[in-house]
Amino acid sequence: MDLPHDSGFPIDVRVPTDVRLIEPLVGLVTRQCAVRQLSPRACNLRVPVALTEALSNAMLYGNREDRSLSVRLRARLDEVSLVLEVVDEGTGFDMEACTIDPTGPEHLEREDGRGLFLMRTLMDRVERFTDGGNVVRLTLHRA
Amino acid sequence: MSFTIKKHGEVCVVDVDGQLIVGNRQELKQKVLDELERGERRFLVDFSQTGYIDSSGLGVLVSLAKKVRESGGEFRLSSLNDDLRTLFELTKLDTLFQIATSRDAGLAAF
């Protein structure tokens, strides 16, 4: 499918559940972050990794890879912060219950379990709520 | 995004060009497992051309390292930029992998 051209923030796009679309979606956001002079660390690490995690969680666990369901991405950036919202059509999950520390020695060799940890570590704030779907909101402050 | 594997002496050097994420991790996994099946035992994954890695990509590296080690081989990484090194430090995976600063240093370490 064709994604919208780089036309700046705000971004509001809905895509089918297809993990191959994650990379171009993330590219769409990070290019605009660079144009709006978000820090290189944010553009090259924090935003792409955290947003990839949110989108893959929405597609794999939220929508359970059901290609008939869609994922919506909303993104806005102002002088204070970048706010990313990823909305899926699944049944949601209890984010607060996910407290496993994947950096502990007993979990270090696990293949999975780092996604939420990375979102929480790389973003200033991670929230989950319901608003016409299950929303994960990632907030990163400029300074 | 692409993965290429080239032999340097006894070492299979895997170049990760682009991102290593949920959408392509299986391709990398299968390519390395195919080489392992063919009898290769030394692997160096080079990230000099890599953008970012997500948790799925990290998970595949952990999985491959375990499989190669269980087969009596060695699985090393090289050429992490500052952002990728930070990612490995945050997840403490820098303590799990042997990471060389460059491809040449990685090859010399085998």
Image (spheres, coloured by chain):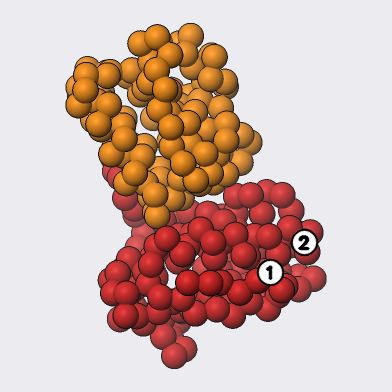
According to the colouring, which chain is orange? Answer: B
Asked which quadrant contains residue A42, the reply is bottom right
Mark 2 secondary-structure assignment: helix
Query: How many numbered marks have been drawn onto this rendered protein structure?
Result: 2
Q: Identify the residue position indicated by label 2 in the image.
A: A35
Asked which quadrant contains residue A96, the reply is bottom left
Indicate which disc residue A6 carries.
1
Name the foreground residue: A12 vs B54. A12
Circle 1 residues within 10 Å: few <14, some 14–19, many ≥20: few
Side of B82 relative to B100 (left or right): right
- The numbered mark, 1 or 2, whose residue comes first in the sequence reads 1
Q: Which chain carries label 1?
A: A
Q: Colour of chain A?
A: red
Q: Which chain carries label 2?
A: A
A88 to B9, vertically: above or below: below
Mark 1 secondary-structure assignment: loop
Residue A39 in picture, x, y percent from top left: 74, 53
B107 to A121, vertically: above or below: above
Mark 1 or mark 2: which is in front?
1
Side of B58 relative to A50 (left or right): left
CB under 8 Å between discs 1 and 2: yes
**Circle 1: residue type:** Asp
Q: In which quarter of the image is the C terminus of chain B?
A: top left
Name the foreground residue: B63 vs A105. B63
Callout 1 and callout 2 share a chain: yes
Regarding residue B97, the answer to whether it shows in the image is: no
Q: At x 56% / y 27%, what residue is drawn?
A: B79
**Circle 2: residue type:** Val
